[in-house]
Amino acid sequence: MLAACAGTNPGDRATPAPAIKSPARGAARPNIVVLFADDAGYSDFGFQPNAMEDMRGLTPHIDSIADEGAVFRAFYMSACVCSPSRAGLMTGRYQQRFGHEKNIPPGYMKGGMALEEATIADRLRGAGYETGLVGKWHLGYPDPYHPNERGFDWFMGCLQGSRPYLEMEEPTPHRVLLRDRTPTPEGGYVTDRFGDAAVEFIQEEREAPFFLFVSFTAPHGPLQPRPGDVDLPELASIEKKRRRNYAGLVKAMDDNVGKILTALERAGIAEETVVLFTNDNGGQTQTAAVNKPLRGRKGQLYEGGIRVPAALRWPGVVAPGTVVEAPAISLDLTPTFLAAAGSAPEPGDELDGLDLTAALRGEAGGPLAQRSLYWRRSGSEGPIAARRGRWKLLWNDRAEDPELFDLANDVAESRDVAGDHPEVVAQLMAELEGYEAGLIEPLWR
Ligand SMILES: [Ca+2]
């Protein structure tokens, strides 16, 4: 189980590594690679406990991250749709604090992710990291909101929330793939182009550690698999065409994850690199994603809208087979990555997440198990939810009573037990009031 921690060089002991049983190279200031899917189903990856039969074997490279590292049993995004989810992840703060509660409409030129907010890329760059973003941005179109202005030294991708996977005859300015600010010619399958760009970034000679965020548009619609892929036996055997095409998007993403992992190996830095795979919001069942056994989908505050697959590989720090049971959230990534970088948030940053390192090292309990997590969509009249321990309070319709679910016994949120636990309801409602007092109304509709 601790095989990845073996082979320590005596010289490595010069680096103080707190509370780690078998110090290994890579523990100090590792590279950080985030592989980010879009709208994928909770059960559509082989490593998930309830993986769908038709997806088994389709995601070997993504599954390898889980096999060699930790799997989160309850990893959440701070939003149930794309743009706010990214704003939360990038800033480490509940995005409703700065009005980023709804998807930025296509072509919206009056704003973007609040310029007062520092991004994880800003912070890691401040800690001496080189920073790259590949793929979908979806955090603002005007130039001050461009990735190159938000902490990323290097960018290849599109500004809009989605685009065709196949060549566009006349790509619009927000859908064309940019290299920094320069449009690139159309040509090639978009997911492959993102994989190639990530490999190019990794292959560049670097003096410093790097942070690479690979933001696939897959498997967000449109359902355009790579030409010819659906004839492969593993896809051709999927009966329903929509599901087959969706599976094709996932397979192309997995192929490119494989390419990226191989590039890390070939560069000799796999042992010095943290790799996280996760997904931006709950699966979109309307494009054939499956979230079983979770209830709901993208756009909802049921578990199916906010709980996502997540696996993290960190050689020498995270033992293969680690399972993180305590609820974690995308907001935790900023403090976690800053700690990995030997840095820390500034006083007064008011980050909303916690450092996950202890949980990733297999320590149960602690503050992670004690804290509450919150969600809101659509402003002060919209749905709002809280999770604390086993309990999830969901107030979908503010004209009605809130519902309470016991996720330890009912992960499918099928039985409202609010009537049996009025004290839990009262406590979580009070917490939600405090949470909501720190939010503003959505900046765009
Ligand atoms: Ca999404």
Image (tube, grey):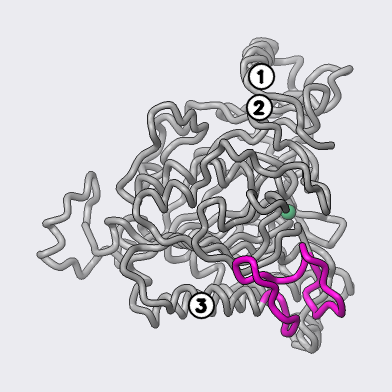
Task: Name the mark on residue 386.
Answer: 2
Tell me which segment is drawn in magenta. Answer: 163-191
Q: Which residue is mark 1?
A: 432
Which residue does the image show at 35% across and 71% down from the upper left? 206
- Establish if 65 lies above or below 373: below
- Which label was assigned to residue 257? none
Which quadrant of the figure has residue 290? Answer: bottom right
Q: Which class describes the residues within 10 Å of circle 2: few (<14), some (14-19), or many (20+)? A: many
Give yes or no for contact between labels 2 and 1 (Cβ–Cβ under 8 Å).
yes
Rendered location of residue 20, percent (x, y): 24, 50
In the image, residue 117 sits, relative to residue 391, either above or below, namely below
Which mark identifies residue 199? Answer: 3
Residue 412 x, y percent position in the rendering: 74, 41
Cα–Cα gap, marks 2 and 1: 7 Å
Callout 3 amino acid: Val
The quadrant where ligand 1 appears is: bottom right
Dot 1 lies on which element?
A: helix
Q: Earlier in the sequence, mark 2 or mark 1?
A: 2
**Disc 2, SS:** strand
Q: Nearer the viewer, mark 2 or mark 1?
A: 1
Q: Disc 2 to disc 3, how far (Cα)?
A: 39 Å
Under mark 2, the amino acid is: Ala
Q: Is mark 3 within 8 Å of ligand 1?
A: no
Tag count in the figure? Answer: 3
Closest to the observer, 414 or 156: 156
**Residue 167 drawn at (x, y percent):** 80, 80
